[in-house]
Amino acid sequence: MIGLRERKKLQARQAILDAAAREFKSRGFMNTAVSDIMRESNLSVGTFYSYFGSKEEVLMELVKNLFKRVEENLSVQESESSIKLLEICCMDTAKLIDENRFILPLFTSAGVHSDKPEHMPDNLSPKFKKIFEEIILRGQDRGEIRRDIPVDLISEMFHSIYQAAAFSKLKIPFQENIHLKIKILLEGIC
């Protein structure tokens, strides 16, 4: 059981994360200052630095939490085929991106660092590609996915779906755009 002091620390940290998510959604990451986050959280700016070193660190914590949600959903779906898991993973990721547009630049800038938030180390970009690779390997081992195409190429294709949907000029909502692209891709790798 945790004490009152520790509980208050956890609550303050969570208040900062929640406020940052709201501010990033409404203002965008680049247009949000630490002072905006702290005003939204009803805490002092000095308190921010007791928990986080920068707003980039807060962003990566939010991304890590979203990543965990995708992993948790996949873990309860483990009995599904690899093809179904890829579809679930893609749609869960599309939903999270659509609901948290502030993380979209991390997906669209995977290969181009100029769109990343300033001073963001490369190793902090989302690790969603790893999930795709694990599912694809499993599918290849089970004979559900072709073996004549390298895993990293297939994974890269899934990752590029988000970029294509983000820059699409079609009048199709983001999640539906992703879903249609996934359908085409999945039919091609079986």
Image: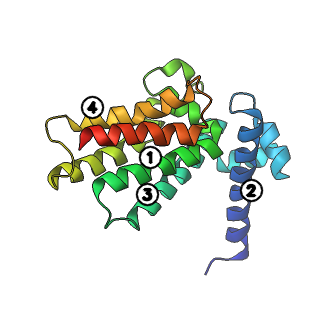
Mark 4: few/some/many CA within 10 Å (<14, 14-19, 20+): few
Under circle 2, the secondary element is helix
Residue 104 lies left or right of residue 25; in this view the side is left
The residue under label 2 is 15
Distance from label 4 to label 1 (Cα)?
16 Å
Work out whether residue 51 or residue 104 is closer to the camera in this orientation and state it. Answer: 104
Under circle 3, the secondary element is helix
Question: Please, is residue 86 above or below residue 177 in the view?
Answer: below
Distance from label 3 to label 1 (Cα)?
12 Å
Mark 1: few/some/many CA within 10 Å (<14, 14-19, 20+): many
Distance from label 2 to label 1 (Cα)?
29 Å
Residue 23 lies left or right of residue 184; in this view the side is right
Q: Which mark is residue 90?
A: 1
Q: Quadrant of the C terminus?
A: top left
Q: Which badge, 3 or 2, comes first in the chain's sequence?
A: 2
The residue under label 3 is 71
Q: Tell me if label 2 and label 4 are in contact, CB under 8 Å.
A: no
Distance from label 4 to label 3 (Cα)?
21 Å
The residue under label 4 is 153
Distance from label 3 to label 2 (Cα)?
24 Å
Mark 3: few/some/many CA within 10 Å (<14, 14-19, 20+): some
Q: What amino acid does circle 1 point to?
A: Cys
